Image (tube, grey):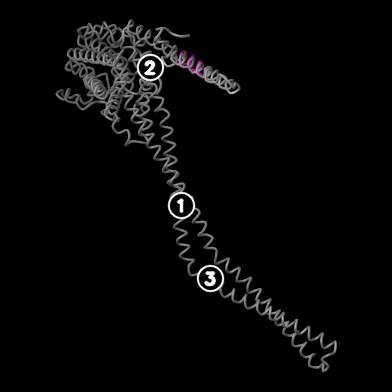
Amino acid sequence: MDEATRSGLMRAQISAFEQHMEQLESTFSKGTLYKMLKLLTKKQTIELRSLTSLSQVSTLVNWEQKRLSGTIGKAKDRDMVHYFSWFLEYVEYLQELKQSFDERIFAPLCQYFYDEEDPDIKGIHSVLEGEGDVYGSNRNQTIILSKTDSIDSGVDTGLLEHSGSDYSLSAFITSPGARTGPRLGSTLEILRKDFPDLLKPYDNKELRHVALQLTRLRRRWNKLFQKDVEVEEDMLDRESVSEVNLFRDSTHFQPILRLVPDVFIKARKAAELARRWLEIDKATSRTLQTKLEQIGDIQTILERKLGYVIHGIKRKEEKLQRGSEQVQMLLKREDRSNELTFQLYGVDKTISSLQRRLRELQVEKDYIRKHLRKRVERESEEYQTYRLKYIQTRLQSKVVDRELSTKQYQRTILEEDMHMELECKPSIIRFTDKEQEKCERLEQQLEKERAEKRKIEVALVPLKSERQRLKVEVDQQKLNRFTPEENRVLQFQTRELDDVRLFTQKVRETQKGEIQRERARLVQIGRHTERTSSGENTFLESAMTDFSSRNRFFLTDGHDSETDSFWY
């Protein structure tokens, strides 16, 4: 069943429901109910300050009926008992009509005119099933119809005779016409949480608002029929006050007096909301091709956004890599003052060692000089020995002194470097901290972009699935537009085209094989010609003549224009 037909049937159901409720309302007398309630509550044997629930009415009527049994009693008392027996059955019938509204109007609206995966409306089906039947679905409506003198509009019995069967809620949920698998609404709902700006044109807030209004109205409507629940002010609509404000001294039983008028008010509101639901759906409904195009646009935008995100991630990763390297370099520069201090300590230690060594050499040199002065004979062996020792010691002193000077110069440079590093260290520390903060911000941005990348990738999975499903439906819809005879012709043409393509492919493969064999034959002829000293032109001319005749076959795609026939 297409959407237009289904929508038309739903409008007919709503109109029939409204007509039947109007007939019931026109036959109900609020004045009679007021008189009977006043008579019931004025009984001297009844001590009751307020009448607020149907169970209280039922209890009072049963008690009054027992009191009148076996006695003649007053006629008005017996009429009162008969009236309230009818009234309770009448309320039960109104409750059954409410159940019929749920099954014949509300359930199809949720099933066919709303995405049941929408989280704002999710659970409506379970709420429907959980409410149950307060009074039972199998009641005798003929007694009520005869007492209200209502005319069969095609809704009263028609709505109820299928209750619990093919038109029950479970049947709607599991019906063959129900859509299965992920749909456009559910897919967009997944994306709407993370990409609200992208899906703003496809939002259905108005329809969601109407659906929630109708759901809340139904819950309050259903509470009116619960016998043991007191009818409170928040369960009733304000409009029902004007229905009974002309009746005096009705404060103590006003909830019961307002109950039936309030049911009719809620029924009218429910019908208006259901009709508004259909109007919004008609205004926002899209054909399968439109949905396919829209979801293709969304997929394109998301894939483009994914490309931008991936490009941004790569750029930030490169920037983070450079920043990390710079931070490592700055940290090393920051530790250079400590390194210079350690080097300075080593140089000072070396200088102290050299100074000590230099003093030792100086003492040794003085000692040798003293002995040389005592030796008069310069040509003696002992004198020459001390003289060589003196020269050796003096040379060592010079070497040590030179090394000491070098170390002292090195210490001066290290000390200057250390002072400079200590002066620059606060600036380096501040700059390093800034670079580290930049790297941390880059890491946070990368984490967000990676999370966004994962979200887009996750969102694209149901989107692609939805697009594929819609494409299949569009193709199937195109096939369904043709008659069976046209479909057979299309299938025959498709098979014929496939056969032509297959034949052409085989011919081309045959041509390719012939060309390869011809080339191999020409190669053999060429080799044979090289080995033959005479008759070379004859072989070549004959080969080329034969090749040109065969080439005519290949150039004409297997058809010889001279013989007007195919070569095989």
The picture quadrant where one finds residue 74 is: top left
Residue 63 in view, yes or no: no
Residue type at numbered disc 3: Asp
Residue 47 coordinates in the image, percent (x, y): 27, 22
- Where residue 454 sits, quadrant-wise, is top left
Mark 3 highlights which residue? 417
Marks 2 and 1, the one that precedes in the sequence: 2
Q: Quarter-wise, where is residue 6 in the image?
A: top left
The one nearer the camera, 335 or 119, is 335
Give neighbour class at mark 3: few <14, some 14-19, many 20+ (Cα, 10 Å). some
Question: Is most of the magenta stretch helix, strand or loop?
Answer: helix
Q: Nearer the viewer, mark 3 or mark 2?
A: 3
Amino acid under label 1? Cys
Q: Earlier in the sequence, mark 1 or mark 3?
A: 3
- The label on residue 302 is none
Q: Would residue 263 appear left or right of 557 to someone viewing this image?
A: left
Classify residue 552 as left or right of residue 355. left
Q: Is residue 290 left or right of residue 440?
A: left
Query: What secondary structure is marked by label 2?
Result: helix
The image shows residue 24 at horizontal and vertical percentages of 21, 13
Find out whether the residues at labels 3 and 2 contact each other: C-beta distance under 8 Å: no
Estimate the x, y position of residue 27 in percent, counting from the top left: 18, 12
Q: Nearer the N terminus, badge 3 or badge 2?
A: 2
- The residue pinned by badge 2 equals 173
Q: Which residues are magenta?
A: 507-515
Q: Position of residue 114 (x, y in %)?
A: 32, 23
State how far apart marks 3 and 2 are (Cα). Answer: 84 Å
Q: Nearer the viewer, residue 47 or 342?
A: 342
Q: CA distance from mark 2 to mark 1?
A: 55 Å
Mark 1–mark 3 contact, CB under 8 Å? no
